[in-house]
Amino acid sequence: MASLSDIGVAAAINILSAVAFFVAFAILRIQPFNDRVYFPKWYLKGLRCSPLRPNAFVSKFVNLDFRSYLRFLNWMPEALRMPEPELIDHAGLDSAVYLRIYLSGLKIFGPITILAFSVMVPVNWTNGSLKHSKFSHSDIDKLSISNVPNGSHRFWTHLVMAYAFTFWTCYVLKREYEIVASMRLHFLASEHRRPDQFTVLVRNVPPDPDESVSELVEHFFMVNHPDHYLTHQVVYNANKLSNLVDEKKKLQNWLDYYQLKYTRNQSQRPTTKTGTLGLWGERMDAIDFYTSKIEKISREIAQEKENTISSSKSVMPASFVSFKTRWGAAVCAQTQQTRNPSVWLTEWAPEPRDVYWANLAIPYVSLSVRRLMVAVAFFFLTFFFMIPIALVQSLANIEGIEKALPFLRPIIEVKAIKSFIQGFLPGIALKIFLLFLPTILMLMSKFEGFISTSTLERRSATRYYLFQFINVFLGSIITGTAFQQLNNFIHQSANEIPKTIGVSIPMKATFFITYIMVDGWAGVAAEILRLKPLIMYHLKNSFLVKTEKDREEAMDPGTLGFNTGEPQIQLYFLLGLVYAVVSPILLPFILVFFGLAYVVYRHQIINVYNQEYESAAAFWPDVHGRIIVALIVSQLLLMGLLSTKEAAQSTPLLITLPVLTIWFHLFCKGRYEPAFLRYPLQEAMMKDTLERAREPNLNLKGFVQAAYIHPVFKGEDDSDSDSATDDVVEEPALVPTKRHSQRSTPLPSKHSGSLS
Amino acid sequence: MASLSDIGVAAAINILSAVAFFVAFAILRIQPFNDRVYFPKWYLKGLRCSPLRPNAFVSKFVNLDFRSYLRFLNWMPEALRMPEPELIDHAGLDSAVYLRIYLSGLKIFGPITILAFSVMVPVNWTNGSLKHSKFSHSDIDKLSISNVPNGSHRFWTHLVMAYAFTFWTCYVLKREYEIVASMRLHFLASEHRRPDQFTVLVRNVPPDPDESVSELVEHFFMVNHPDHYLTHQVVYNANKLSNLVDEKKKLQNWLDYYQLKYTRNQSQRPTTKTGTLGLWGERMDAIDFYTSKIEKISREIAQEKENTISSSKSVMPASFVSFKTRWGAAVCAQTQQTRNPSVWLTEWAPEPRDVYWANLAIPYVSLSVRRLMVAVAFFFLTFFFMIPIALVQSLANIEGIEKALPFLRPIIEVKAIKSFIQGFLPGIALKIFLLFLPTILMLMSKFEGFISTSTLERRSATRYYLFQFINVFLGSIITGTAFQQLNNFIHQSANEIPKTIGVSIPMKATFFITYIMVDGWAGVAAEILRLKPLIMYHLKNSFLVKTEKDREEAMDPGTLGFNTGEPQIQLYFLLGLVYAVVSPILLPFILVFFGLAYVVYRHQIINVYNQEYESAAAFWPDVHGRIIVALIVSQLLLMGLLSTKEAAQSTPLLITLPVLTIWFHLFCKGRYEPAFLRYPLQEAMMKDTLERAREPNLNLKGFVQAAYIHPVFKGEDDSDSDSATDDVVEEPALVPTKRHSQRSTPLPSKHSGSLS
């Protein structure tokens, strides 16, 4: 167990590294040639076209204004200066509400820290229980609950504090939920018109022998929503096409690279080999090779595009249906259409840029099977992920390598290399796995068939949180793999489990303090440096960039990464709530993390990140729910801990806490969650009425028509015009029919016809 | 442990008592003076006015046709003869689907019994494990899994059978769910028009300083559902009024009684005392006394009626809103109306006779608190109900009574009475509690604030099932009170619990066989005799009945009693599924129960019960869910049992079963449950269109207007006409406004006005 001075040393190291990151950032960000790495958001928004200080040639690359180096932390107040409404306008509601998670952390743990240090630290400190203990202990432990002797009446303090912390947390959570819900509704009601407000995605259109999907959809909605149906957009299975387009882009990159190479060194035309990655095969002129390849693939793309649009097989049984009013869309999205609840499924259409097109092609019947498979896979991933890693580790030892690749033996036997392999190889397998974990989880979510990026990220976040909870939180407290824990838990009684974990908690305080400093402090500080995008940008800039547009593409602003970021924050909530009563010494470290992260991410959101979608804070119920889970876990563990401390008389009072917390959660769920799932009709009606009064002659059809076309059909490539005309040709063919029959709807004969 | 012959004796006794009941029933039912007890349904439907054989005077009371006594079981084929569609027409969908529960039992357990007896009984029988066992055993146990030696490979049979039984059960369940769902939709789509198809109940209308609730509701729906809103009916808090009406009825009964007494014996006017129950106070002429009392209360009722209607305080923030089309109502019921999800709550209005009026007055804010309180109360009721009973028992012993009431000592000390008290008193406290349990549970549900009788019964059924599961099923297997079990379970590990229960299961087979015979066979046979209604009817008939209408009221047809009946059936499903693999000998007994109960209840439904409401089989998802729970419990217990039998290699295969079952449940939930919660728009539109074509000039407003008036306002008493006119007066005052503004809706000014 670490003493206070050990913690001090660790803190010093981490603070120093954080400061180093900040200094590096301060120096790099004011260099004009890094401007696009650290301020890409402004470029993408078109508010900045070149670094701000256009001086001499040198100062285009290096900042020579030495005064600016001194103010190396001045980005912090800058980041905090932008008011929230402006931030929502600048970066979207998702980002602004994401920052509120950090803010909630500060709001929850600020008062808790003060209370804990003013009440609980003195109560714990003035005991002498550890002095007589035979276990080794440190000053840190003197501040924790371990220092209170068994059966002491002082535990009442901890009990009262547990109540106080719970009530405070719930109060903050309720206020935040309220604020976020009203922010969301305000955002949805805010001025600008968006196609997704009028559009509903209908899936699982049942097959009909007489009519095409498009006709069927039109008839169905004209009959069942006669006064509101406006138009619709069928969905094509363009997965093959979009693969081709991706490949073409890759080839184009290579062509650009060789062309640039040739421009710089005109003496010699670059050559390449025709095989995979240019490693083998015939050597030939690279520019000619790629030009011909691109031509070939362009022809293929044009062909495939034609096939997709003309063939009825590539039309999927799904469609984006647009309504004349938001009211009509809200009604359609929230109701069931037919007797069979698994066909004609309607839901709000995601924002056009949020649609995950590849999954629209998954038939509904396979969804529930996929869900089962992913659930089982995730279970095994969480509890047995160590098995394949252990296998790799056992293969990847010295003897294994020597056996498999005997010719490497002389090299491996060199002492330095040998010790390197022995020291790092086993760890590397684990690191690689953890690095790829978010990707694996994202693949799982994609396989499950969600149709918008935002849902995919939310689902991945849930899984990532679960994984972290089991493997990081529980795994660190009770050392051992998740599977060993599972095995233990099955063989332990229900009231032993919180005890087992509860008892180990105070002992792990120092470990988690170090974890917070490394992952939280230094990690957040590293985030602002953006080392990977910095390197990538400069590499691309020197090898690929020809035009201003290329340079724009070379910027990699990135996104918030909800699927990895949010679970990380939740881990801190969990640690904070669990340790608040047990070892309050942890709290200031968490408070620093939340403060630092808030400033850093606020800066990044303002200057860097470019959100790919806008879900209007649809993730908040998840965030709220996970903090509630953390609260309940903390209460159960405290119960376990206190029962080993012979303070069993407090158990009934402690059982009341989770019951109240669960009830609070249900209350919040009923009160606020609907704002995140449904769109109230009154709001819709108000906005419709307002719009009708303001723009009586609005051509809504023109507005929504092109919104939900698969991105490959409106790509910027040469065959662009074809598809555009194709779409236009197809659409007007439908319109007259619709208009015509709409005037005389609903004809009963037609009605029954489309149903038979 | 009972041997086969013991079981035989018990079976003989129970079969004899069942036969006795049937014979008694056969004799009593063909007596003309019992006709109204055994065929009330036909009287209520107006299909029968007097016993079928109008002969001489004597044969009006006693059946003299001796041949009819010989065919004493001929009601059975009669009960089975009515085809299901006719049954639905005759008794409603609820009753018809209720019978399907028994039918599902037959469908599930029929093939399971055959399979179990042809495969598992030989496998169990041909072992010799019990011969060498030191425990006492019987022939019954030879048929059970206990006879298979530990670690035997024969357990693979049981494993395969568990899979077969699970798949068969799931198959039947899926088919039944499908059939019931389509029956429900067909029923809803069937011809006759009902006011609840057009009506939505809106609750928690927010208070408005400028407008009354009625105006507010009208404006809100005229703005937000402009094309569909038709009319609405405000809800009055008439709880006080309906108490007065109840009291008047009671007084009227007494008056009738004395008047009848006087008519029979004109020599002496009956007298009564004025105090409570006529036990003390001044003696005076009974007819005068009750006449004056009734007059007084009639005045009070008239006064209260006026108060209720005129005072704005008695108008509750709730309203029944009717729409012009089913489509409009379906849309309103399934959508959220405003930003705040806890105001303007809309849901389908229950059938008028299904409305539980008293609960409409409960404000929404208190609902979630009430729910928490009831949850906690139910927890304590289930686990600690033995405590008050034990208290009563300890008080209600000989010494306690002698101490409290010393003057009784001479009587108590008589030996016969003493032994009677000692033997029965402790048991009586428990019996009385169990007798009142359904009432207690119903009170809990009422307190929780559900607004329709059907929901109240469903919720009570869930609680009753839980109570039975814990206290009857688990309580019989692991002897001890529920709280002791809870305590044990908390201190046992998760994998010990199924073991503990699983091991005791085979040993309890004989107990449950006896239970099934007593509760299932003889109990069901007793149901058909209707002893209590029989006695009550004859009592009322001789003391109260003056007119034909009185006689009609004296019939107590009763209802199915979903809240007690369904949990009882579920217990048999649970027993059947749990014992199917363990002790197949139980299965024939369960099969007999299901068969017998099906015939008996079919007869009762056709001839006796008069359902108070029609929920269109809304209870089926509960029934389905509970059978699934029984299935999972049986799988877990089998897992526990096999793991003690050293057949642990089967555990992974057994774990798969509950996972698959849960997945199957989720699949069914997604596929069929919406049919029980929502009303598809296509159906609504179809029915609307059909109706518009058939009856273009339908006056829907007249049809729905009076449907949702509180029953006390349309009672048959003298002040009936007042309230009717009151309502009519109130309604037309609203109509012109509505019609007027509907033509020019939505006026934005009016819109914003009603929102401010």
Image (tube, coloured by chain):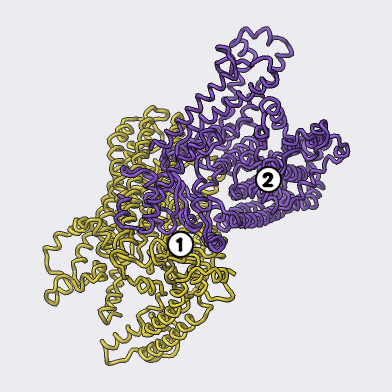
Chain colours: A purple, B yellow
A571 w.r.t. B681: above or below: above
Q: Nearer the viewer, residue B103 or B265?
A: B103
| Placement of the N terminus of chain B among the 4 image quadrants | top left
Residue B424 on image: x %, y %: 41, 62
> Is residue B486 shown left or right of residue A601?
left
- Residue at 53% from the left image edge and 79% from the top image edge: B312
Residue A645 on image: x %, y %: 70, 45
Label 2 CA crowd tier, 10 Å (few <14, some 14–19, many 20+): many
Q: Which residue is mark 2?
A: A573
Identity of the amino acid at label 1? Answer: Cys
Label ID, residue B332: 1
Say which chain tag 2 marks: A
A566 w.r.t. A381: above or below: below
Residue B197 on image: x %, y %: 37, 64
Q: Based on the displayed image, in which of its 4 quarters is residue A694 positioned?
A: bottom right
- Confirm whether residue A664 shows in the render: no
A57 w.r.t. A649: above or below: above
Q: Nearer the viewer, residue B41 or A515?
A: A515
